[in-house]
């Protein structure tokens, strides 16, 4: 049948309401004797235990899907990706039983989602070549040789004949797979990419690859149905299913996945204006899709829930596999080790995964578990980071078992500890914050939940972080950092101190983020490995649960997570006219404005002030010389003239000019400049007063008594490094005290 005539029929069918929902129609559309039915699933993520709880008898399972398929003639069953990974039922045997279930259920074709790669390239190749009884298809997954695309790894499509009609199922895999799985899996032992997924920065390469496959399939089939794992989330642009349809021609329908979106039936115009049916079932087998291709060429789709299929008997063979595997896994992981009265969650009322764009209490819990692991081992750990995409649970409360921990962390990643620089840590936070927006709730699996750290994200500052066409970090922002006020917990004093970009920090995380470029985190290249392959992610959680006090029954009560800990502050503050990275509502804005106008401090270029950056002793000597009215000549190094002035005036001995200045050193230089005046101050309110070095005590007392230095949280933090924002504040208060 001609494409244009089919399109007209489709438009008329929709206008007439033939694409009614299952619930409105009272159940599945009854197929005629010459109709073709394609049943489809996507993003099941190994949720095979639905219906196991009382009251959930109507939930969908593979056995129910298979049972329904058995009742139909002229039927195909296909999957649009992300089937083998997600819960313990997948990770306990690297997807083997899930494939066994799909074989038994009678799947005809599947495509690769990004999470099909989570067990490694060798494993997914083994599944496709040896274990799956059905073919996998993908037109844009290919070999690479020295960066040059080679042959496709899989067939682009499969043509299946049903009731004399030839249907081509054409596979498309999201180019995000490389970073949303593990980039190292696509590389050889030398870090060279040997597998690629065609995408292109503007999507053109993807569109061309798919168009080529469509053109070939059209020669062999009556219908071309895309079986894609692209999704409709704006964060996936330009590789969304809607954009692909709009930039190609020849598709009759698109069965989608990846974004976990329920799309019962939507019409999207292709490049020539022909309507293409777009559909997606959501996720976790909440629905089964049914596409009906009628004898006149009309294509309609509907989403069927477990309630819609309540009268369908599960396939006995598939059901037996499900029950045996569920029982086996639950027995192994079902031991209860603790409980909590708090509700650990990551979702809002609309079902949005908040953990991928803001702090959640489960995110705090997971990051704290990593921090505790290494701290309890007696290792020096400063910060822990946890990618939001690695936290998968819905609401958790009450009893906590190993299986509960598996529901939170499903990937089987392994904890590691690395020594990184402050700059690498800042770049990691900036990369994780690149998609945070106050207008569009875009998800980002690389959003970092943290422990031992506090930071602010300003969504008014556009993200200019650099990345390659695979979505891997290649450099920091070309403009202002949207991450600021980064503070690291000092475990000795209990105080938070500004991040020192030149200092070293021990960072706890999982190999996915720190070592394998997961979510594109490539800024840790060159980090020193302290300890690796320590413990699997779900055991890290179990280990942390068992650190809490136990009751008489030996169960450990997890407390302190009834709400978020305010570690991540998200603001939308238009930058000031002075600097792109200083907002008019920042606490340090008046100080930055003052020291800039007075000429004591200057920006760092590109209209940036770098408030969280460090200040050296030489830089402070130069600022004090400017305060004193001294005209400094240009020297090499740039701080030489300021250092010579400081030595001549008795402000400093001029040593270590490139070392980061501490708070006590800063006020001591100021005190010396004004003649070392006598002053007394009661420091008893500060719990760290004994940490003030003897040589700086008089200066500290003078600074406190004159309001130049104020502590926070009952601490002076005299030996902590002072960032540029804090130095600006000290300089303003010093100037106001001395000059009035």
Image (spheres, helix red, strand yellow):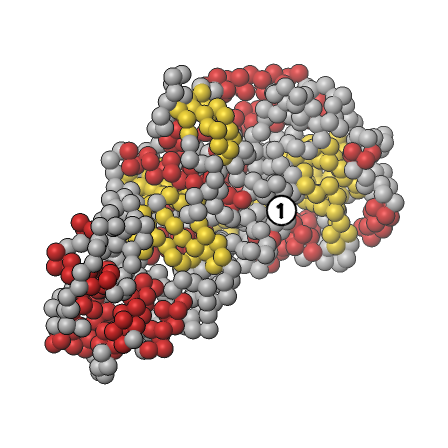
Residue toward you, 718 or 656? 718
Specify whether 626 is left or right of 220.
left
Which type of secondary structure does the marked residue at label 1 adopt?
loop
Q: What residue is shown with label 1?
A: 231
Q: Disc count in the image?
A: 1
**Quarter occupied by residue 619:** bottom left
Residue 488, horizontal then vertical, whole percent = 32, 50
- Residue 365, image x, y percentages: 42, 37
Residue at 25% across / 74% down in the picture?
738
**Looking at the image, which residue is at 34% across and 42% down?**
508
Asked if one can make out residue 732 in the rendered structure from this viewpoint, the answer is yes
**260 displayed left or right of 3:** left
Name the residue nearer the viewer: 117 or 568. 568
Residue 183 can be seen, yes or no: no
Is residue 410 shown above or below 449? above
* 386 left or right of 621 in image: right
Identify the residue at horizontal 51%, vertical 46% (top origin). Answer: 356
- Percent position of residue 196, x then y: 50, 48
Characterize the local packing of mark 1: few (<14), some (14-19) or many (20 or more) Cα atoms within 10 angstroms: many
Q: Quadrant of the C terminus?
A: bottom left
Report the front residue among 641 and 625: 625
Residue positioned 83% across, 43% down in the render: 298
């Amino acid at each position: 049948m001609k494409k244009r005539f089919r399109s007209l029929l489709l438009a008329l069918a929709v206008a007439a309401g033939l694409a009614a929902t299952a619930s409105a129609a009272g159940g599945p559309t009854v197929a005629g004797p010459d109709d073709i039915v394609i049943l489809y699933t996507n993003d099941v993520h190994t949720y095979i235990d639905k219906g196991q709880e009382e009251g959930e008898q109507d939930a969908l399972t593979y056995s129910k899907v298979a049972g329904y398929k058995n009742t139909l003639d002229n039927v195909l069953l296909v999957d649009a990706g992300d089937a083998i990974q997600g819960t313990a039922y997948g990770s306990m045997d690297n997807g083997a039983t899930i494939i066994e279930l799909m074989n038994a259920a009678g799947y005809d074709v599947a495509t690769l989602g990004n999470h099909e790669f989570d067990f490694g390239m060798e494993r997914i190749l083994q599944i496709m070549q040896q274990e799956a009884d059905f073919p996998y298809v993908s037109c844009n997954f290919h070999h690479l040789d020295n960066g040059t695309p080679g042959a496709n790894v899989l067939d682009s499509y499969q043509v299946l004949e049903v009731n004399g009609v030839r249907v081509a199922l054409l596979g498309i895999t999201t180019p995000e797979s490389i970073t949303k799985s593990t980039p190292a899996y696509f590389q050889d032992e030398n870090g060279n990419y040997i597998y690629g997924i065609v995408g292109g920065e503007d999507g053109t390469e993807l569109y061309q690859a798919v168009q080529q496959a469509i053109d070939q399939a059209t020669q062999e089939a009556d219908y071309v149905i895309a079986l894609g794992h692209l999704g409709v989330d704006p964060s996936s642009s330009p590789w969304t299913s809607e954009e692909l349809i709009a930039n190609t021609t020849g598709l009759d329908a698109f069965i989608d996945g990846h974004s976990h979106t329920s799309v019962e039936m939507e019409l999207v115009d292709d490049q020539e204006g022909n309507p293409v049916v777009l559909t997606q079932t959501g996720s976790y087998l909440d629905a089964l899709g049914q596409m009906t291709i009628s004898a006149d060429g009309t294509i309609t789709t509907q989403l069927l829930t477990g309630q819609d299929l309540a009268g369908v008997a599960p396939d006995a063979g598939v059901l037996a596999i499900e029950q045996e595997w569920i029982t086996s896994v639950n027995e192994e992981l079902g031991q209860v080790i603790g409980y909590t009265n708090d509700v650990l969650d990551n979702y809002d009322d609309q079902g949005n995964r908040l953990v991928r764009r803001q702090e959640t209490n489960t995110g705090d819990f997971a990051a704290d578990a990593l921090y505790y692991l290494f701290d309890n081992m007696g290792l020096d750990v400063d910060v822990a980071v946890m990618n939001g995409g690695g936290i998968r649970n819905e609401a958790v409360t009450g009893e906590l078992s190993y299986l509960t921990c598996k529901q939170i962390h499903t990937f089987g990643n392994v904890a590691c500890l690395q020594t990184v620089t402050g700059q690498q840590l800042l770049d990691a936070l900036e990369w994780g914050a690149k998609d945070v927006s106050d207008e569009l709730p875009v998800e980002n699996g690389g959003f970092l939940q943290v422990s031992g750290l506090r930071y602010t994200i300003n969504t008014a500052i556009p993200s200019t972080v650099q990345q390659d066409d695979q979505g891997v970090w290649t450099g920091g922002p070309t403009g202002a950092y949207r991450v600021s006020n980064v503070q690291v917990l000092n475990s000795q004093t209990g105080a938070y101190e500004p991040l020192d970009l030149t200092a070293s920090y021990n960072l706890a995380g999982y190999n996915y983020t720190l070592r394998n470029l997961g979510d594109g985190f490539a800024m840790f290249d060159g980090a020193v490995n302290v300890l690796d392959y320590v413990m699997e992610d779900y055991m890290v959680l179990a280990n942390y649960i068992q650190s809490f006090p136990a009751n008489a029954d030996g169960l450990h009560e997890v407390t302190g997570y009834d709400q978020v800990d305010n570690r991540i502050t998200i603001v939308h503050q238009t930058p000031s006219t002075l600097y792109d990275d200083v907002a008019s509502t920042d606490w340090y804005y008046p100080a930055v404005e003052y020291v800039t106008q007075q000429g004591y401090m200057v920006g760092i270029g590109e209209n940036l002030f770098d408030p969280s950056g460090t200040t050296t002793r030489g830089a402070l000597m130069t600022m004090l010389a400017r305060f004193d009215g001294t005209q400094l000549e240009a020297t090499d190094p740039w701080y030489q003239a300021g250092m010579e002035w400081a030595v001549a005036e008795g402000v400093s001995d001029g040593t270590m000019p490139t070392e980061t200045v501490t708070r006590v050193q800063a006020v001591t230089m100021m005190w010396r400049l004004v003649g070392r005046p006598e002053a007394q101050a009661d420091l008893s309110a500060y719990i760290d007063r004994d940490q003030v070095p003897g040589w700086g005590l008089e200066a500290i007392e003078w600074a406190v008594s004159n309001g130049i230095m104020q502590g926070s949280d009952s601490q002076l933090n005299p030996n902590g490094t002072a960032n540029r924002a804090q130095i600006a504040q000290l300089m303003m208060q010093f100037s106001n005290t001395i000059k009035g």
